[in-house]
Every structure is written in C-alpha cells, then in structure tokens.
Image: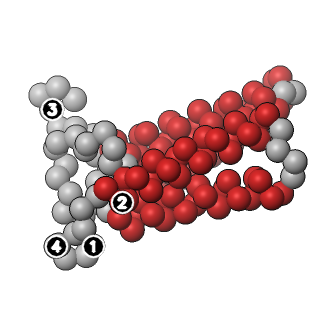
Amino acid sequence: MPGGRPFRVTTATTKVGVVLTGFLLTVFGALTAAAATESTGAVAVVAVLGTALTAVVAGRTFRAAGEPVRPPRPWWRLTGGRTSGSVVAGVFVLQVVSLLTSSPVGPQEGLVVASSASWAAAYLHSALRTPRSTGPRG
C-alpha cells in the first residue's frame, strides 16, 4: 500500500485461516464448476487457479518471526525459512504422487500434476535459496 503499512500476516493462526480459506474457496469453486459445466477440465482449471492464488497471496503476505514486515520479499522467496519451504514443497510432491498413482492421468489430471509439480519446485527453490537462520528459532 503506497505510503501506508503493507498488509502482512504474522501469526500462525491467521496463516492457517488464510490457507484454509483459500482451500475451501478452491473446493467450492471446483464444485460449482463441476455443477455448472459438467466438465472435469473446468474443475481442473479452477483447482489450479485457486491453488495459485492461495500460494501467491501466502508468499507475498506471510512473514516469519523476525522477518522484516515492511519490505517486500525477493520474487523467489515464498516462505520465511528453509523448513517451511521444504514442508510445503513436500505437500505438493505428495499431491503429485497421489494423483499419479491413484488413477489414469488424463489431460485434466495432467494439468493439476504439472501445476503441483511447478509449485513444489518453486517452494523447494525458495527453501534452498533462503539463507540459514542465525537467530533464535520461532
């Protein structure tokens, strides 16, 4: 926000609330797309867009303990630290593995797999590139 205090999420409960809200909105959007279009392609597109929106909002607004609040993060940094980036990357990897092993992968599933694999790579890149913390753990 120009001249004002930027919107930042610093508490764990608010972070959980934001991610849960993004997840629920994505699920409801996918269900609405399924009911309105009867197309699995539309469901996949809504799922990919909802995931992307949630990840971008979280990456730009969440701040870890001790992380500066005012300046924006570098473009590549999605989490406050190595551990959180690795955990989120792991969740996306589990989603990819689950999708690839649960059923035949068609174009719609392929879109979700490609998106999740891309997010896993982005979060892993963020984790590996983030400097090790030298301060107290929080």
Quick check: 44 above or below 12?
above
Q: Identify the image quadrant of the N terminus.
A: top left
Amino acid type at image mark 4: Gly
Q: Which residue is mark 4?
A: 135
Residue at the image position 19 percent from the left and 49 percent from the top: 69
Q: Earlier in the sequence, mark 3 or mark 2?
A: 3
Amino acid type at image mark 3: Gly
Image quadrant assignment for residue 4:
top left
Q: Earlier in the sequence, mark 4 or mark 2?
A: 2
17 left or right of 129 in image = right
Quick check: 30 above or below 100?
above
Q: Earlier in the sequence, mark 4 or mark 3?
A: 3
Nearer the observer, 43 or 25: 43
Please name which of the two marks, 4 or 2, marks the residue nearer to the observer.
2
Q: Are marks 2 and 1 in contact (CB under 8 Å)?
A: no
Nearer the observer, 134 or 13: 134
Amino acid type at image mark 1: Gly
Q: Which residue is mark 3?
A: 4
Q: Are marks 4 and 3 in contact (CB under 8 Å)?
A: no
How many other residues sit within 10 Å of disc 3, few (<14), some (14-19) or many (≥20)? few
Q: Are marks 4 and 2 in contact (CB under 8 Å)?
A: no
Q: Earlier in the sequence, mark 3 or mark 1?
A: 3
Q: CA distance from mark 4 to mark 3?
A: 28 Å
For residue 20, which numbered disc appears in the image? none
How many other residues sit within 10 Å of disc 2, few (<14), some (14-19) or many (≥20)? some
Q: Secondary structure at mark 3?
A: loop
Amino acid type at image mark 2: Leu
Q: CA distance from mark 1 to mark 4?
A: 9 Å
Q: CA distance from mark 3 to mark 2?
A: 32 Å
Q: Secondary structure at mark 4?
A: loop
**Image colouring:** secondary structure
The x and y percentages for residue 49 are 59, 33
